[in-house]
Structures are given as C-alpha cells and as structure tokens.
Amino acid sequence: MSTSKGRVLVTGINGFIGVHIARVLIECGYTVVGAVRHDSKAAQLRKLLPQAVTTGSLTFGVVPDIAKPDAFDEVLSSGEPFDAVVHAGSPVSFALEGIERDVYQPAIEGTLGILRSIKARAPSVKRVIITSSFVAIVDRSKGARPGYTYSEEDWSPVTREQGLTNAGLSYTASKILAEKAAWNFVETEKPSFTITTLCPPFVYGPADQVTNIHDLNASSAQIYAVFEGKTLAPISGYVWVDVRDIALAHVLAIESTAAANQRYLIAGGKYSPQQVIDYMWEKYPERAKEKNISKGTPGKIWPDGGVFEVDTTKSQRDLGLKYRSLDESLNDTFSRIAELESEACP
C-alpha cells in the first residue's frame, strides 16, 4: 500500500528551481512526475535522486512543446490520479527576434494549456501552483523608489507591446501576461481546483540542475561573472530569495488551505550588488585579488536615498515560510560554483 502524500506533476523540473522543487516534494513524501521536453533532460535529476527513481517516487513524462493546446493531455491522463500540479516551466530569452513565438506563446499558452488540460483530464487535481516572478510586481520605471513597499497587491505596468519592442522587457511581459491569463481562467472557467501564484525575485543558492559551469541559469551566471572578475556585480534588483526557500514555498502552497487562489511575494529580503562584492572579498580574498575583482565602495550597501522595501508578511503567515540569510545563500551559491569549477578541471 502506497504511503505517498499525493501525486504531483511538475513542469520545468530540470530547471534551477524545478530540481529543488522535486527534491523537497519527495522529501515531504510526495510522488513526483516531471514533465520534460525529451527524456535526456531528466538525466541530472536521475543522478541527483537515484533512490527516488528506484522506488518510483520520481518518474518522467515527455512533453515536447508546452505551447501546443493538448500538450499535457497525455501525461495528465497517465498512471494514478494527480493531486496537485506545479507549473514552474517558463522560457527565458533576451533576443529581440521571435519574442511572440519563443517567449510569449510558451509562457501564456503553456500556462493556459495546462490549466485547460487539468480541467478536462485531471478532475482529481485540487491545487495548481504557478511560478510567476517579482518582475510581474515591481515597477522598474520607478527605479529604487525609496519609501515605497512592494507587496502582492502590486502589478508591473509593462505591456505586451513593450515586450515585443524591447528584448529586455520580453520576459517581464511574458510573466505578467501568463499570470494574468491564469487568474482570468479561474474567474471565467471556475475550475474545481484552486491556483496559487508565487513571485520570486533574483534566485540564488546551489545550482544543482547543471553539471557544467557554462550551463548555469541566469542568476547563478551573474554571480559567476562576478566571481570571475568579468563584471562589477549582478543586476541590481535589490531583492533576492534562496532557491531552497522558493522550492519549499511551492510545497507549502500545496498544503496550505489559506493559499487557495492567492498570490505571494516570495523573498528573503533586500540585498545589493555591493554586498556580493564585500562577501567575496571577505570569504575568497585570494581569488578576488587574482581575478582583480573591483572592490566597489566597501560597506556602501544602498544608493543615496535608499531603496524600496518588500512586504513578505503574507508568505510567512499563510505558508509558515522562514527565509534563509543572505550569507547562507551566498555561501552555498559560491560553494556549488567552486564545485562545478573543480569538476571541469582535467
């Protein structure tokens, strides 16, 4: 007799956040089915979680193109009934060409497609967790915006049209459009399941989804660029979260009755690029010297006038989430990068 707490489909399972979501779900007693574009994409997870694969706690289903209307029909209809779905898959591209096809369609139609398939094919599903982003909340046109506090009530004003003409805004627009499409689906279709959207900012922590240092995800690659002395600091988003905390938030959102049809800002707090530089010089002084990493302005954490605040009260109250410290997250981020570097050495 199975002792599983439930069966969960996870899209984007081979991504930075997805790998950690799978691990936490399995540790919490769930059976996980990961949706991958082709079977080879599951290789790293099979290596990371061999016992789960052996026991059947982790299996995979191939979904070649999430933008197709019936993309998830087969995987949702296979095996035992699903109890929940985590939709963490979303394209990231900063090329100006093909935005509609390569960014908007997979993000929007992928989200709507899986919601439609769940409604039609998986009536047992009670909760759907969607990974949105802090970019769908923050108004970057306002800059540092000292004195303002962002929360789940905020929406970025970036439009579809802006994303089509500015490659730097295409990802932002795709996350806004996909999340709003999901909320509109719930309002108009009134499915038997509820949804929860999670909005993380820059995500740091151990990049367990890759085996090659050159395959790092965007936020980890930014940190690595600093570590290599190629740039002064990562993009100054001022807000961060550890990958293990956002992964746990997905699981807690499945289990929390308070999270039904709710939106959450998931953030460990504020940070600045200078803190990353200061940390590196403190913990890796020899490397910092060797790579000629600029010291910036040591100790000057915030720009004159300060920066906006973020309110994560709701996530802590409803989900019981306790966030890691920036030092812990940076330590584990750099440790994993160093590990990948050593593995790359002949």
Image (cartoon, rainbow, N blue to C red):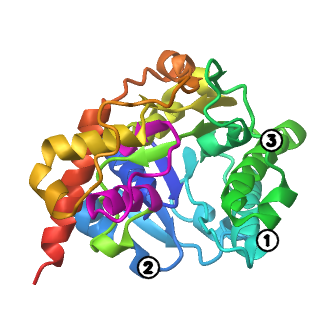
The structure residue drawn at horizontal position 78% and vertical position 60%, both measured from the top left corner, is: 163
Whole-number angstrom distance, CA of label 3 to CA of label 1: 19 Å
> Which range of residues does the magenta coloring cover?
218-244
Label 2 environment density (alpha carbons within 10 Å; few <14, some 14–19, many ≥20):
few
Three-letter amino acid code at the position of disc 3: Pro
Q: Which residue is mark 3?
A: 157
User: Residue drawn 44% across and 68% down?
Assistant: 60
Indicate the position of residue 35 as horizontal and vertical percent values. Answer: 52, 66
Q: Are marks 2 and 1 in contact (CB under 8 Å)?
A: no
Q: Tell me the distance, in whole angstroms, between the alpha carbons under discs 3 and 2.
A: 38 Å
Q: Nearer the viewer, residue 152 or 43?
A: 152
Which secondary structure lies at badge 2? helix
Q: Position of residue 261 (x, y in %)?
A: 70, 30
**Residue 234 painted magenta:** yes
The residue that mark 1 highlights is 100
Residue 218 vs 326, above or below: the answer is: below
Q: Callout 1: helix, strand or loop?
A: helix
Q: Nearer the viewer, residue 15 or 157?
A: 157
Contact check, label 3 and label 1, Cβ < 8 Å: no
Asked if residue 29 can be seen in this view, the reply is no
- Give the crowd class for mark 1: few <14, some 14-19, many >=20 residues within 10 Å: some
Q: Amino acid at mark 1?
A: Glu
The mark closer to the camera, 2 or 1, is 1
Does dot 3 land on a helix, a strand or a loop?
Answer: loop
Mark 3 or 1: in front is: 3
Left or right, 203 with respect to 200, comes to: left
In this view, the residue farthest toward the bottom is 346
Query: What residue is pinned by disc 2?
Result: 39
